Image (cartoon, rainbow, N blue to C red):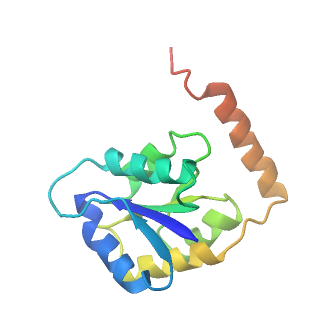
Amino acid sequence: MKIAIGCDHAGFKLKQHILKKLGSKYQFIDVGTFTEDSTDYPDYAVKVVEAILGGEAEVGVLICGTGIGMCITANKYRGIYAALVYSDETAMLAKRHNNANVICLGGRMVDFDDAARWLELWLGERFEGGRHLRRINKIKELEERVCGQGFK
């Protein structure tokens, strides 16, 4: 499985930790950033999303200071379901119930070993379907109806 991973400066240390800890077990496509110099998180969210939508990667990991900005940015794209993960349970349910194809982590908010564990938990889960599929389909219908229309 190919995993696109990206971060801003606030997520750089956590990204490096994940790559060191899990890089031999999974195939990562690192889209940056590659330093702790200040940068803008939307730039790297877009790179991860484009890797997924372009077929380069199956799933993605986004890391900024809180994970929130990355999550907001990624969820602007049709077909991207990004979830902010902050516990074992949210990691597992992001896949089981929400079929998230991107997880977002807060590099300034979480223990690095916990975050690596959450990534592995998420990768090991499968979407349950059933009642959850009905809800995901409602989200997809909403995407089709409102995405790109803006507010008046």
Q: Reply above or below: 90 against 118.
A: above
User: Is residue 111 something that shows in the picture?
Assistant: no
Q: Reply above or below: 35 against 140.
A: below
> 77 and 132: which one is in front?
77
Using the rendered view, name the quadrant where residue 14 is placed.
bottom left
Residue 11 percent across, percent down from the top left: 29, 64
User: Is residue 128 something that shows in the picture?
Assistant: yes
Residue 66 percent across, percent down from the top left: 34, 59
**Left or right: 86, with 135 as reference point:** left
- How many marks on residues? 0
| Picture residue at 55% right of the left edge, 25% below the top | 148
| Picture residue at 69% right of the left edge, 41% below the top | 139
Using the rendered view, name the quadrant where residue 48 is placed.
bottom left
Q: Reply above or below: 127 against 145.
A: below
Residue 35 percent across, percent down from the top left: 19, 64
| Picture residue at 45% right of the left edge, 70% below the top | 28
Q: Pick the quarter of the image with the N terminus.
A: bottom right
Instruction: Find the residue positioned furthest to the left.
Output: 37
**Left or right: 130, with 98 as reference point:** right
> 4 and 136: which one is in front?
4
**Left or right: 24, with 136 as reference point:** left
Q: Reply above or below: 29 against 121.
A: above
Residue 143 percent across, percent down from the top left: 65, 34
Instruction: Find the residue positioned furthest to the top.
Output: 152
Using the rendered view, name the quadrant where residue 73 is placed.
top left
> 128 and 17: which one is in front?
17
| Picture residue at 59% right of the left edge, 58% below the top | 101
